[in-house]
Image: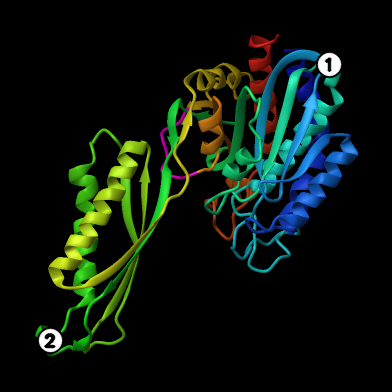
């Protein structure tokens, strides 16, 4: 584990550059599937470091290959590079310069972290066992996501294990968490368009009220989770949008509902989809309305390998201390890191980045989102620590 001790010193030296990289990226964000300039900037930095890389992987993704002089496993490490369609409302000198686009989830920090990890490994190839494969992934924020396309383009071919981190402001700086098994939920989105028959508000018997049909669906769909899902298998069905009607004395002819389904097990997930379709069809038939239903299937659940999650609880106390190493609860937020975990064992981890003293108190996807930049050092140490712990057990 000699490299781990060396990493701590080098990451501390690189920290001012990490901050500069992160702030540059924060000022120049690009949306999912449009990260062309970000990828070009990264490629230039990586070539300056001396890294071997592939570009245009899964869109605008990059794969960095760093081969050590010693035999050992192929360990993949991943960072996402895309931003969100949010107007930056922070009052700071590194606020986004792109109107309506912002790094509001910490991906700029993930990218800067992995860039520092690349520089460390490239500088220590003589002591490196095996290969470190660094994945700079586009389009995490929007389905179908960049991870599936990276996998399609060979990102996991020959890899033995994969690790990823998310800087997480709900956790305080100086802590980290994960859990074995289902960690982050699948997230699917649906739209229901209802078409009734409009009419005069005083003559409801001559119409088919789309608002009544929609209201019946809002109420009835909640019984899918409460009465069809095993209570021991967590799931959420939420209607987030209900659009219908124009004024007080006209019966609405059309209604649109939008919602999301969150679940942790594939069998539960697709049972809910099936029940949704049946419930919508029969409810609309009962009221005499027509309908169109579309389900957009999102990312699978993030399911951490048991052995690799256990590795986190071996490695993390050396970085965060025993008190700062936390067993997480499952969370109904989605992440396309799940596609990598379908290919190989691995572990996705949260690194605490919240700190009210530096303005890092807003939730992810908030216009004033920010994080404690020191968490990037923790994230780099955790990625390297996990990789080297694995290599120490799986050297050839």
Q: Which mark is residue 236?
A: none
Residue identified by numbered label 2: 206
Label 1 vs label 2: CA separation?
81 Å
Question: Compared with residue 349, is residue 42 higher up or lower down, i.e. above or below?
Answer: below
**Of residues 282 and 38, which is closer to you in this image?**
282
The reply to whether residue 80 is visible in this rendering is yes
- Asked if residue 332 is among those painted magenta in the image, a careful observer would answer yes
Q: In this figure, which colouring scheme has been used for the structure? A: rainbow
User: Please, is residue 383 above or below residue 89 in the view?
Assistant: above
Callout 1 environment at 10 Å: few (<14), some (14 to 19), or many (20+)?
Answer: some
In magenta, the rendered stretch is 327-334
In-image side of 51 versus 84 (left or right): right
* Between discs 1 and 2, the one toward the N terminus: 1
Residue at (47, 45) in percent of width and height: 299
Which residue matches tag 1? 69
Disc count in the image? 2
Q: Where is residue 392 in the image (x, y as percent from the top left)?
A: 68, 11
Residue 337, placed above or below residue 314: below
Pinpoint residue 387: horizontal percent, then vertical percent. Answer: 67, 22
């Amino acid at each position: 584990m000699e490299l781990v001790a060396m990493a701590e010193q080098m990451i501390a030296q690189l920290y001012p550059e990490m901050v500069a990289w992160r702030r540059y990226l924060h000022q120049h964000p690009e949306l999912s599937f449009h990260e062309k300039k970000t990828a070009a900037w990264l490629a230039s930095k990586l070539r300056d470091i001396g890294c071997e890389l592939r570009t245009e992987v899964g869109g605008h993704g990059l794969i960095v290959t760093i081969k050590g002089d010693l035999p050992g496993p192929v360990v993949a490490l991943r960072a996402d590079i895309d931003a969100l369609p949010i107007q930056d409302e922070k009052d700071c000198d590194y606020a986004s310069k792109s109107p309506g686009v912002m790094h509001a989830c910490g991906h700029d920090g993930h990218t800067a972290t992995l860039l520092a990890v690349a520089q460390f490994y490239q500088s220590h190839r003589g002591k490196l066992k095996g290969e470190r494969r660094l994945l700079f992934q586009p389009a995490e924020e929007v389905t179908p996501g960049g991870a599936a396309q990276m996998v399609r383009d060979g990102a996991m071919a020959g890899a033995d294990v994969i690790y990823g981190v998310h800087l997480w402001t709900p956790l305080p700086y100086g802590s980290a968490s994960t859990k074995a098994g289902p960690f982050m939920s699948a997230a699917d989105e649906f739209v229901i368009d209802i078409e009734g028959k409009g009419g005069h508000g005083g003559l409801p018997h001559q119409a088919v009220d789309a608002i009544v049909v929609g209201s019946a669906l809002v109420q009835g769909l909640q019984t899918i989770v409460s009465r069809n899902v095993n209570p021991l298998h967590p799931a959420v069905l939420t209607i987030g949008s209900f659009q219908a009607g124009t004024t007080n004395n006209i019966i609405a002819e059309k209604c649109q509902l939008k919602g999301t389904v969150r679940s942790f097990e594939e069998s539960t997930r697709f049972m809910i989809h099936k029940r949704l379709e049946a419930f919508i069809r029969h409810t609309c038939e009962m009221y005499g309305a027509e309908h169109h239903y579309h389900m957009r299937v999102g990312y699978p659940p993030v399911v951490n390998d048991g052995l690799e999650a256990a590795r986190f609880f071996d490695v993390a106390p050396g970085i965060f201390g025993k008190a700062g190493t936390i067993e997480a609860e499952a969370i109904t937020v989605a992440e396309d890191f799940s596609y990598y975990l379908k290919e190989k064992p691995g572990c996705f981890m949260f690194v605490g980045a919240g700190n009210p003293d530096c303005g890092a108190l807003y939730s992810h996807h908030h216009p004033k989102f920010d994080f404690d930049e020191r968490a990037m050092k923790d994230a780099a140490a955790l990625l390297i620590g996990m990789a080297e712990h694995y290599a120490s057990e799986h050297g050839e």
